[in-house]
Amino acid sequence: MKYVIIGGVAAGMSAAMEIVRTDKKADITVLERGADYSYGQCGLPYVINGLVTSTESVIARSVETFRNKYGIDARIHTEVTDIDASSQTVRYRDQKSEQEITYDRLLIATGADPVRPEWDGINLAGIHCLKTIPNTEAIMADLSEEVKQVTIVGGGYIGLEMAEVFTSLGKKVRLIQRGDQLASIFDNEMAKLIEEEALKHNVEVTLAEEVIGFSGSQRVQKVITDKAQYNADLVLISAGVKPNTEFIVNSNIQCNEAGAIRVNAYMQSSVANIYAAGDCATDYHMIKQLEDYIPLGTTANKQGRIAGANMAGNPITFKGIVGTSILKFFDITLARTGLTEAEATKLQIPYQTISRKSTDHAGYYPDANPLHIKLLYHRKTNLLLGGQVISKKGADKRIDVLATALYNRMTVQELQDLDLSYAPPYNSVWDPIQQISRRT
């Protein structure tokens, strides 16, 4: 069986290794447009401020390992330009020429690219995005002592992480967000806690302003919004991502409105023998009970493994996501799962909310930290719909409990029955999520 995989990072190489384990006679070719394979993109911000020693540290397996140890034809600097499903052919160009390769089973695992709007002055030096190892190295090379003021466009996860990174490097940081709150995947009252943390660390937060361009002589000097102009020595654009699927526009592969490839539970696309996984593919959201698009590394690795198993003849299914994510932001942790109020409202789901400020461990034990928790549940059935937790410590434990409860379709009252760990240095005798559930 001849397998071709487009994309050599999370989903692509998870699939490749599953094929290696399942089909001992597999002929596997991977086409990667960059030079790096199988690396942790989520670790790249921490390379920039030195918490992670180098970009090599985030690479799980090198190109040479895939070639020499696993017998995979792992190619680099190879960009796919077209797919012909009728002849099962992939056309691509490398550094030498344009070529084509045939397949029996094809996986599209091309990930997502940063959104880089066509703003005036967008190509000035000093304007960056962060998604790849080359992006990371370009930012590091550009962070000279002359760079004093950094402006970040976008207050999502990457924007928040990089605000902390640049601040730790002694830069003055401004965050510009076109919406009226940071971190739109949180509800407004939780987002206010995030803004307070930013201001506490001298990050200037500019809300409800939309960037329209940049100015400068060769290098960026100002960021121009619809309301003002701001000095900037370096700009990071963190305006979201889009699926890297432009090369399939001439195929019959179905995509959603965001450009993500529609897949079923076996990671099959709408075209025979073509699969998709990772940040270029859709997810099934178990709470929404709808197709969704939430590009995360955890999902990419799971989908890649499942795609590889199915391609190699071992049918297993992707059960879906509940929308769980977590982020360190200065001294606090931001965590969420399930639905926000905005999502529940959009879906016309009748819901109730309840919020509580507790502590991450027993209040009488030294150094207890505030823990802010919010739950959403169905007004009629009491099924848990979502949760958000912000705290200095303990948010990770609680959000994973809530994610597990969502996966198992528990009611908010059933949280009280969970046998959760307790000792004063770690918890109260009633965990905060059980404390809050008793008030519903």
Image: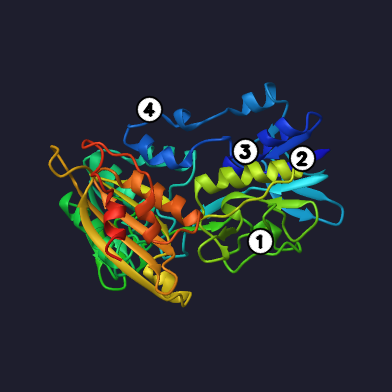
Instruction: Give me the C-alpha separation between circle 3 and circle 2.
Output: 13 Å
Q: In this view of the protein, can residue 37 be seen by the observer?
A: yes
Of 114 and 378, nearer the camera is 378
State which mark lies toward you, 4 or 3.
Answer: 3
Rendered-image quadrant of the C terminus: bottom left
Amino acid at pointer 1: Arg
| Numbered badge on residue 243 | none
Amino acid at pointer 3: Ser
Secondary element under disc 1, as helix, strand or loop, is loop
Q: Badge 3 local density, few (<14 within 10 Å), some, or many (20+)? A: many
Query: Measuring 54% from the left and 61% from the top, which residue is drawn there?
Result: 285
Amino acid at pointer 4: Thr
State which mark lies toward you, 1 or 2.
Answer: 2
Q: Residue furthest right?
A: 87
Compared with 1, 226 (above or below) is below
Q: Earlier in the sequence, mark 4 or mark 2?
A: 4
| Numbered badge on residue 53 | 4
Q: Earlier in the sequence, mark 1 or mark 3?
A: 3
Residue 290 location in percent, x, y? 57, 66
Residue at mark 1: 262
Residue 32 location in percent, x, y? 64, 40
State which mark lies toward you, 4 or 1.
Answer: 1
The answer to the question of whether label 1 and label 2 lie on touching residues, with beta carbons closer than 8 A, is: no
Instruction: Give me the C-alpha separation between circle 1 and circle 3.
Output: 19 Å
Of 228 and 375, nearer the camera is 375
State which mark lies toward you, 4 or 2.
Answer: 2
Q: Badge 4 local density, few (<14 within 10 Å), some, or many (20+)? A: few
Q: Badge 1 local density, few (<14 within 10 Å), some, or many (20+)? A: many
Q: Residue furthest front?
A: 417
Secondary element under disc 4, as helix, strand or loop, is loop
